[in-house]
Amino acid sequence: MQALKLASSIATPYAVVGLSNSKGKLQIESGAISLNEKALLEILKNLGATGKVDEIVKVPFSKPTTIYFTGLGETAKSYDPEILRRGAGAAARELAGVTSATFALPATNLAQVSAVAEGAALGAYAFNEFRASSKGDFKEPLGQILIAIKSTSDAAVKRALVRAEIIARHTATVRDLINTPPSHLTPDSFCNRMKKIATPLGLKVEILNESALKSQGYGGIIGVGQGSANPPRLLRISYSPKSAKRRYALRLLARSSQSPN
């Protein structure tokens, strides 16, 4: 899991900086960080950079050693959080194999900082469980992510980074489930996997096997399960805080079709 931290300067060999375009004129968007824009703009111009969304331009530099310019589209006084999230994610994917990088993007309010943190953390994902002959060529996703802002002591911003880590961690879990072949993600393995995640969070977990399903009248699940070598399961996760005033139910069936529904 990627570590998210705040920084007031670029202290890593790699940095991510925004790049926008206003009527053909490139604009470097480095947020709270000052850079030698004149020299960098000349390099970017020679490289044919456009600043378009999803564009990544890698520029060898001195300090930091390498800058990844991520396109933000049209120059704006304040960028939409989704643009920043998308730009940070694209850069994080390009930084596979790098231990740590500083993201110096034009994020001044809480929503923008949250977007950068979430985008970077979500972009630093890879699924490597079933690699064999190509495993030696695999690059680990970006490790430590530093978000450069003016004030690193803001409590709300710190909470936003914690939230971004939680979102990225559980999104990665869902991605892992999607990427796992059905032959390896049976109803039983799915339920056990969810139990390992839910139990430490203080959630009540109940797994109904074929005997329990039959005794409790789950005929539909039993009927579907008869067509598979993998017996059906029903996963029930409950969260009942003392202060709760309403009750909600979300049912997720891990059926015997070799993949969860």
Image (cartoon, helix red, strand yellow):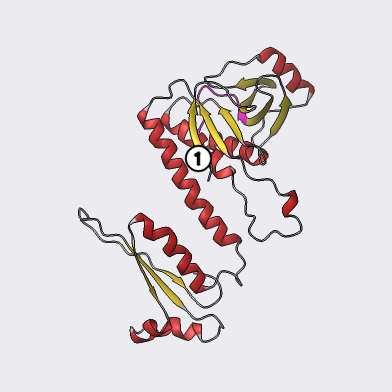
Is-magenta flag for residue 75?
Answer: yes
Q: Please determine whether, in this image, residue 155 is positioned above or below residue 219.
A: above
Q: Is residue 43 left or right of residue 188?
A: right
Name the residue furthest right.
46
Image point (54%, 37%), residue name: 85
Identify which amino acid the numbered label 1 is placed on: Glu
The one nearer the camera, 144 or 84, is 144
Classed neighbour count for the residue bearing mark 1: other residues with Cα under 10 Å, few (<14), some (14–19), many (≥20):
many
Q: Quadrant of residue 101?
A: top right
Q: Please determine whether, in this image, residue 130 is positioned above or below residue 115.
A: below
Position of residue 256 measured from the top left corner of the image (x, y, whole percent): 52, 78
Q: Is residue 244 left or right of residue 227?
A: left
Decide whether the magenta segment is chiefly helix, strand or loop. Answer: loop
Q: Please determine whether, in this image, residue 69 is positioned above or below residue 181.
A: above
The residue that disc 1 covers is 118
Position of residue 39 measured from the top left corner of the image (x, y, whole percent): 71, 14
**In the image, which residues are magenta?**
72-81
